[in-house]
Image (cartoon, rainbow, N blue to C red):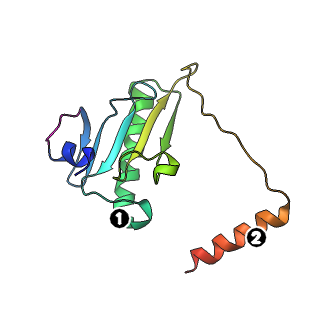
Amino acid sequence: MNIFEKIVNREIPATIVYEDQDTLAFMDIGPIIKGHVLVIPKTCYDPITETPDEVLCKLIRVAKQVASAQMNVLGADGVNIIQNNGKTAGQEVPHLHFHVIPRFENDGHHWNWNAKCYDNPEEMEQLAEKIRKGLSE
């Protein structure tokens, strides 16, 4: 049982900001920015590619509501909504979750985005074609 399942089962405490029959949103105890909220399904799904579409729809609706509250009540200037899949992508808890992170002008946080480039347009087109084929399978 992972830590999120223990939170859902009330085996460990969490500061809950939203709950319905299927979804739970609570404060991240290690916030990137204060006000950072995690939105999870109460049932454990992992990875996102194996999660039912109706669950994903509920989660993103709740993430949207949380983001709106962060902007309206906390005065956030923007919001990052992030979902990582697999250890390589930075996922630490094997339970689908969205990070909803309020952002403020001069909050001091910077994403270390190190953009790459394709060797040529043909390389990009070849990868796009593989993805297109994968979408039709």
Q: Which residue lies most toward the front here?
A: 88
Residue 120 in picture, x, y percent from top left? 86, 59
Amino acid type of disc 1? Glu
Tell me the quadrant of the picture where the C terminus can be found: bottom right
Q: Nearer the viewer, residue 57 or 83?
A: 83
Q: Quadrant location of residue 123?
A: bottom right
Which image quadrant is residue 132 in? Answer: bottom right
Looking at the picture, how far across and down is residue 107, in whole percent? 54, 20
* Label 1 SS: helix
Main secondary structure of the magenta stretch: loop
Q: Amino acid at mark 2?
A: Gln
The magenta stretch spans which residues?
Answer: 10-14
- Please tell me which residue is depicted at 40% across the width and 29% down the height of the picture: 31
Would you name the residue on which mark 2 appears? 126
Q: Is residue 47 left or right of residue 29?
A: right
**Label 2 SS:** helix
Q: Choose the circle earlier in sequence order: 2 or 1.
A: 1
For image coordinates 79% across by 56% down, the residue present is 118
Tell me the residue that label 1 is attached to: 54
Mark carried by residue 125: none
Label 1: how many Cα within 10 Å (few below 14, some 14–19, many 20+): few
Residue shown at the point (26%, 49%) measured from the top left: 2
